[in-house]
Amino acid sequence: MNAFDGLLTVWNIIRPVVDVVIMTFLLYKAYQIIVKTNAMQIIKAGIMVALFYAFAFLLNLSTLLWILNKLAPGFAIAFAIVFQPELRKVFLKIGQNELFTFGNRSRHTYVDTAVVAAETLSKLKKGMLVVFTRHTRLDDIIETGTKLNADISSALLVTIFGHETPLHDAACIVQNGKVLAAGCFLPLSEQYDIKKTFGTRHRAALGLCETTDAVVLVVSEETGAISLAYDSKLHYDLRPNQVTKILENLLEVSAAQRTIEDTIDESKASI
């Protein structure tokens, strides 16, 4: 009994610390999700509504408070409808988040193959759009293209994107070293502050990584710049060694955040 009382005493001492640590962890993860989904609009709208309600409460505007209380359920439904795209992205990110994943996955050796193809097409000023899947299934995207289920190779990617074939204008979907499909159509980005110089490929790359956790490799047909899109951001005009390093880390889930920030700091530009 004395031992139990001792453990209870120790727990009572460390309980506030555990409470603070867990709350800090949850707030940090919530911040990551908000940043990656551009859900700041939801927070701003919520703050505005709360301030308006607090204003009415502090000034004791009874009629306005009565109206607000009656309209509250309608506001909640309208809020969900208006911000449906942002809310969907938040819940997608929560579902994709592997908080308790342990151990390392094997190195994706096909990354070099894709980067070599990107370098070749960059020199030829030929556009390229390759999607690397992670956790989110892309069955609906794959259905829009032509299924290949072929081993990835530089020659295959250069053939698809380097010649005027029916498949060269859309995207290839790559998973575990296999080109699952080519000629796939991606959703365009909903962001409003994209540079006007970016074409459909870059907008499509951003559009997909706004709603999934996929990583998209893009080669610009106009400039030959090689870029990566992931987590709702486009990192433009990267060097091949930067692309390789970022892809290897992003596609290895347990080590995904190990060196990405250092690599991105070296990039020429990002949006």
Image: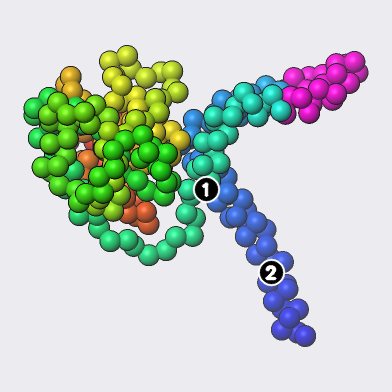
Residue 50 relative to residue 192: left or right? right
Asked if residue 240 can be seen in this view, the reply is no
Secondary structure beneath dot 2 equals helix
Residue 199 relative to residue 99: left or right? left
Percent position of residue 87, x then y: 58, 34
Q: Closer to the camera: disc 2 or disc 1?
A: 1
Q: Main secondary structure of the magenta part?
A: helix
State the CA–CA distance, disc 2 to disc 1: 32 Å
Magenta span has 54?
yes
Percent position of residue 36, x then y: 46, 36
Residue 125 relative to residue 71: left or right? left
Magenta span has 41?
no
Q: Amino acid at mark 1?
A: Gly
Q: Which residues are magenta?
A: 50-76
Q: Foreground: 102 or 139?
A: 139
Percent position of residue 94, x then y: 53, 46
Examine the image and state in which quarter residue 86 appears: top right
Q: In the image, what residue occupies the spot 37% across and 54% down?
A: 253
Residue marked by disc 1 = 95
Q: Foreground: 234 or 180?
A: 180
Residue 211 relative to residue 65: left or right? left
Q: Amino acid at mark 2?
A: Trp
Quadrant where the N terminus sits is bottom right
- Give the vertical position of 88 relative to 79 (above or below): below
Residue marked by disc 2 = 11
Examine the image and state in which quarter residue 108 appears: bottom left
